[in-house]
């Protein structure tokens, strides 16, 4: 079709017009013919009503019902068998193809970048950068999901903890009353002015410096005046100069300007979409790549008003990724993407897997982290996530690779792999372990993981009332290998649709046990049969061959990572216009083989990252406002 | 100053804005009754959750008559206090259409809201204020902590069902439709929060005398900032303003308590406690990793917080619907993996054991409450403790007869010691009735509620 992945700006209007035309000429009649009698304003079978969807096909609120309709029409689940009329295959195909163009109906929209509260990790790191305290000072705060799905809200519990952590920070870095100031204190507050001089003026200049770094932007005159009222409060309560500044700093640390990323400039409220100001952009970038506040260089560029320039921004990405702070990209994004957040506390059968000690679990996560880091730092192709000939091991972890004789000691180091069944995330013990049950592998979980996390496909949850494995007839299944038992899924038509795609992937990884060791027999003693076939007659008989087939699907792999990383960067789910942004980005990064730094750089310079919507687009403001 | 009359709570609902009405502390709850002889304690409200439902025939009593004499296996641990428990069969859950693919993302988040998320903005949290927070809005101002939220697992599960925000999976308390309330998972942190950084219950958290004035000034600054921002940003700042005001109220309440404690030290009798009341229980933070000990210390903290009137509302997520195992029970299977049991004996037995285990932790908590003297009865007499799940039977995700256990008499408002096998109502009705029994005026029904379940109520 004409509208594949090459959605460049000039074509956009034409594509949009074409999509609208097909919608009016064909899609709307299709729905009126086959769907809206039962799913319309007069009847809403299953709570589904396509009237609002057809009225606003490009609205983000319609996305869900389109997806639902697509799935059901594709699978011939709808209209139901007893319906009066059935669409022809050609009509179904028309709708399926039109759905690929629906993104062109979305208005150009960067999404809202609502003032965002720092995550627990960002907050701790920022305190470290400001005051040299251990980021663990934030440990009491509740754990949070980062990126897409981040709950940008604030509860009384958190506010209370912010106050108590602020007190703790000040107790650690400032001298107690009547004692000589600490070095940090001298750096923050300077000397106490000699008696008789203007204390308030001196305090103002200190507050201005403190606020500038803590707010990550210059404080306005009005904001400074507010902080001086805190100084006045302290003075009125007979606190000395240093203690008064301490109170000012405490106020700063519980202020929204510190706890949230806030704009430096008042946005032009008569525009619906505005670019981020330089300081906002510096923070957004720095919290994305480093999970902490911008450094002096970023501040200097923001001061100079240079950060909006694409080449400057790209150069900053390169520089920041080379810095060790960029490990935050793994801690915040990578670990979540790979599903390793829960490995530390996941239950394993201790008799079957005594190896799963704290050290082992830590080494598993470290392996994934160092590998992820190497792809970022060395600007490797993202395809190497799947196919790679090196990894990182220490003595503990080497035991799972059968390399404990050559690799010893607790330090992780880069190891060249000879066994081509190994290498890449699909055969990494940490990932194989998180996708297993406590006492055995789960080909299904592994298959779902590969499809969803690696290839970016959506796997619907199993319907209720379908027995997982152990629940089937015990007698009959007792002597079957796990593979033979799992294949029972495919005898049931309800299950077969999904399982025929996900099970083979899981089987292809069956040579790895529930903690990632190689094996030739499964727990029943039956030989592992790692052969399978994926759509398109792609046959494989070992993990090595499975990985090769998946690595060939470059565009899907890269698109999936791009979508996930963009959603992480924007802290929200992707919708409407974002899909066009992804299309454009894919074209660019494909040119030199999907390299990781280029991908990150493209995300950081993308339209939704550097702009924000401040009013709903549907409701233009009237002039009288 | 001692007030000689009890005020009508309803008249004060509107006055509970920014300022804490401190003198109310003396009249609301624990008020002197007519002669100043006995102090009538306030009603406290607690919720405790288990995911994935139960094995129905091991949970529901055979009939109303045998409820007390031969209770079903799941309720074994509650036997000593069954006469203070109420079970009702027939409470239906919120129908989850159009989110059929999200049974587990919704079981917890609909539990106290009795409402579905907004379908058009599903990628963000947008549901409804939950029953516990409705209660906290009303009674939270009288205590140093407006409400207590506990959990035993971090609320960070990332699983997308039906495009719903991941937060739905792990949260049940919502302060407003868009504000999930995080729960505390570390017992040490909870203890610190209740009593300050000391292991001696009874000592209060220290506050800086200037903090309240400091926060006032910070709030003024935040309001300046708010004026300059677009609407969506303003809403975020409103959450900030609201949460900081809550901290101010908490500081005020702590200061008030400190004054009161100082008076007690000097021999002035407390208006809140009777000489015959049990002393505050002791908290021992377990060192091992046993799930029962972990769950029980959280129960103890809940009991202590109620006993010392640090809060009157608590919500305890015993576990969230993802990935918990119970090695203590002799198997490592994850809870959810066993609930699709297709009536096969082995997984059914495991789910039954997990259910009994969870109810036993609840029983541990309410039995402790029943052992503590308070006023003319026990702490439990003055509580409404609700245990339950957001699914009836995890095997088929049914929600027709949600399992609930209500322990305590709510200060005499709950007609307990009974099993009502044929109750008609939904979970919104149940929550609305519970709030009414706790004396919380509700200006609109909770979620899908249409009525109160009058059979629950003890009619004087």
Image (cartoon, coloured by chain):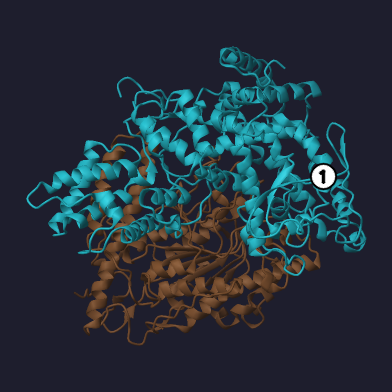
Q: On the image, which quarter does residue A301 sit in? A: top left
Q: Is residue B269 left or right of residue A373?
A: left
Q: Is residue B162 visible?
A: no
Chain holding disc 1? A
Q: Secondary structure at mark 1?
A: helix
The residue closer to the viewer here, A221 or B125, is: A221
The residue closer to the viewer here, B348 or B415, is: B348
Q: Is residue A169 left or right of residue B350?
A: left
The residue closer to the viewer here, A429 or A322, is: A322
Residue A148 is situated, as x and y percent measured from the top left of the image, at 55, 41
Q: From this view, report whether residue A588 is shown above or below residue B230.
A: above
Q: From this view, report whether residue B391 is shown above or below residue B115.
A: below
Q: On the image, which quarter does residue B90 sit in? A: bottom right
The N terminus of chain A sits in image quarter: top right
Q: Name which residue lies at 65% across and 45% down.
A: A371
Which residue appears farthest toward the bottom when viewing the image?
Answer: B276
Residue A57 is situated, as x and y percent measured from the top left of the image, at 59, 25
Residue A559 is situated, as x and y percent measured from the top left of the image, at 66, 31
Q: Which chain is cyan?
A: A
Residue A18 is situated, as x and y percent measured from the top left of the image, at 63, 14
Q: Colour of chain B?
A: brown
Instruction: Look at mark 1 in the image and give the residue it sits on.
Output: A543
């Amino acid at each position: 079709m004409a509208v594949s992945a090459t959605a460049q700006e000039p074509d956009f209007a034409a594509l949009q017009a074409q999509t609208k035309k097909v919608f009016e000429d064909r899609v709307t009649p299709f729905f009126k013919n086959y769907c809206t009698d039962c799913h319309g304003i007069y009847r809403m079978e299953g709570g589904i009503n396509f009237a609002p969807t057809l009225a606003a096909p490009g609205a983000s609120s319609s996305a869900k019902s389109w997806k639902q309709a697509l799935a059901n029409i594709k699978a011939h689940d709808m209209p139901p068998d007893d319906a009066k009329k059935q669409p022809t295959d050609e009509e179904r195909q028309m709708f399926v193809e039109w759905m690929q163009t629906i993104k062109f109906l979305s208005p150009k929209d960067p999404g809202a970048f609502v003032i965002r509260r720092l995550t627990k990790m960002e907050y701790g790191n920022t305190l470290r950068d400001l005051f040299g305290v251990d980021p663990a000072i934030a440990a009491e705060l509740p754990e949070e999901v980062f990126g897409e799905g981040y709950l940008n809200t604030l509860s009384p519990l958190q506010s209370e903890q912010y106050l108590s952590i602020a007190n703790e920070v000040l107790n650690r870095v400032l001298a107690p009353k009547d004692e000589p100031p600490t070095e940090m204190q001298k750096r923050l507050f300077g000397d106490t002015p000699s008696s008789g001089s203007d204390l308030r003026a001196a305090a103002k200049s200190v507050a201005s410096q403190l606020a500038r770094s803590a707010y990550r932007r210059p404080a306005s005159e009005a904001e400074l005046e507010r902080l001086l009222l805190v100084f006045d409060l302290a003075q009125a309560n007979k606190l000395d100069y240093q203690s008064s500044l301490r109170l000012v700093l405490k106020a700063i640390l519980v202020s929204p300007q510190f706890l949230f990323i806030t704009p430096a400039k008042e946005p032009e409220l008569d525009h619906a979409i505005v670019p981020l100001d330089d300081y906002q952009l510096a923070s957004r970038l720095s919290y994305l790549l480093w999970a902490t506040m911008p450094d002096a260089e970023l501040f200097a560029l923001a001061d100079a008003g240079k950060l909006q320039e694409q080449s400057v921004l790209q150069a900053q990405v390169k520089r920041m990724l080379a810095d060790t702070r960029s490990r935050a990209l793994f801690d915040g994004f990578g670990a979540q993407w790979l599903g390793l957040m829960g490995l530390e506390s996941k239950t394993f059968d201790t008799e079957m897997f005594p190896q799963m000690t704290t050290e082992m679990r830590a080494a598993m996560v470290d392996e994934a982290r160092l590998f992820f880091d190497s792809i970022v730092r060395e600007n490797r192709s993202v395809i190497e996530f799947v196919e790679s000939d090196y990894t990182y091991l220490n003595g503990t972890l080497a035991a799972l690779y059968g390399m404990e004789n050559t690799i010893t000691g607790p330090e992780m180091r880069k190891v060249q792999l000879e066994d081509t069944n190994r290498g890449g995330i699909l055969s990494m013990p940490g990932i194989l372990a998180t996708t297993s049950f406590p006492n055995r592998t789960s080909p299904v979980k592994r298959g779902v993981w590969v499809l969803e996390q690696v290839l970016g496909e959506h796997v619907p949850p199993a319907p209720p009332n379908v027995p997982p494995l152990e629940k089937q007839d015990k007698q009959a299944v007792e002597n079957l290998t796990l593979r033979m038992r799992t294949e029972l899924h495919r005898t049931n038509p309800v299950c077969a649709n999904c399982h025929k795609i996900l099970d083979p992937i899981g089987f292809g990884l069956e040579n790895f046990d529930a903690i990632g060791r190689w094996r030739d027999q499964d727990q029943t003693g039956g030989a592992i049969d790692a052969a399978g076939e994926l759509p398109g007659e792609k046959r494989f008989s070992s993990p090595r061959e499975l990985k090769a087939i998946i690595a060939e699907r470059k565009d899907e792999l890269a698109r999936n990572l791009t979508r996930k990383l963009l959603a992480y960067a924007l802290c929200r789910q992707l919708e409407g216009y974002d899909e066009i942004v992804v299309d454009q980005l894919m074209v660019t990064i494909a040119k030199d083989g999907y390299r990781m730094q280029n991908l990150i750089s493209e995300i950081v310079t993308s339209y939704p990252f550097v702009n924000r919507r401040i009013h709903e687009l549907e409701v233009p403001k009237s002039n009288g406002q | 100053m001692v007030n000689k009359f009890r005020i009508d709570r309803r008249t004060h609902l509107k006055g509970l804005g920014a300022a804490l009405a401190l003198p109310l502390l003396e009249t609301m709850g624990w008020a002197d009754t007519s002669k100043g002889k006995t102090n009538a304690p306030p009603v406290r409200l607690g919720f405790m959750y288990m995911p994935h439902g139960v094995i129905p025939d091991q949970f529901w009593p055979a009939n109303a008559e045998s409820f007390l004499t031969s209770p079903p296996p799941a309720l074994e641990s509650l036997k000593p206090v069954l006469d203070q428990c109420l079970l009702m069969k027939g409470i239906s859950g919120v129908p989850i259409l159009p989110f059929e693919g999200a049974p587990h993302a919704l079981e917890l988040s609909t539990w106290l809201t009795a409402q579905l998320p907004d379908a058009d903005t599903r990628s963000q949290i947008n549901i409804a204020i939950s029953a516990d927070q409705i209660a906290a809005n009303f009674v939270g101002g009288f205590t140093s902590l407006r409400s207590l939220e506990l959990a035993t697992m971090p609320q960070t599960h990332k699983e997308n069902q039906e495009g719903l925000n991941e937060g739905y999976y792990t949260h049940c308390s919502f302060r407003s439709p868009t504000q999930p309330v995080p729960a505390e998972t570390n017992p040490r942190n909870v203890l610190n929060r209740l009593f300050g950084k000391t292991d001696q219950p009874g000592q209060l958290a220290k506050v800086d005398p200037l903090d309240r004035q400091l926060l006032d000034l910070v709030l003024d600054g935040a309001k300046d900032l708010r004026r300059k921002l677009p609407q969506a940003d303003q809403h975020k700042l409103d959450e900030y303003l609201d949460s900081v005001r809550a901290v101010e109220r908490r500081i005020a309440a702590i200061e008030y308590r400190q004054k009161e404690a100082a008076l007690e030290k000097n021999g002035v009798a407390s208006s809140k406690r009777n000489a015959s009341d049990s002393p505050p229980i002791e908290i021992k933070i377990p060192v091992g990793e046993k799930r029962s000990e972990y769950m029980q210390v959280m129960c103890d903290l809940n009991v202590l917080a109620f006993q010392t009137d640090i809060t009157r509302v608590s919500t305890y997520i015993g576990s969230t619907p993802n990935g918990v195992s119970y090695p203590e029970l002799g198997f490592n299977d994850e809870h959810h993996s066993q609930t699709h049991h297709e009536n096969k004996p082995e997984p059914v037995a495991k789910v039954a054991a997990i259910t009994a285990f969870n109810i036993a932790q609840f029983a541990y908590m309410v039995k402790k409450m029943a052992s503590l003297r308070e006023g003319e009865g026990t702490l439990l007499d003055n509580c409404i403790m609700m245990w339950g799940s957001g699914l009836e039977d995890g095997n088929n995700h049914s929600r027709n007869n949600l399992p609930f256990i209500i322990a305590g008499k709510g200060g005499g408002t709950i007609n307990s010691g009974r099993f009502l096998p044929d109750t008609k109502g939904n979970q919104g009705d149940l929550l609305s009735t519970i709030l009414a029994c706790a004396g919380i005026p509700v200006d609109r029904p909770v979620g899908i509620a249409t009525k109160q379940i009058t059979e629950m109520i003890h009619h004087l």
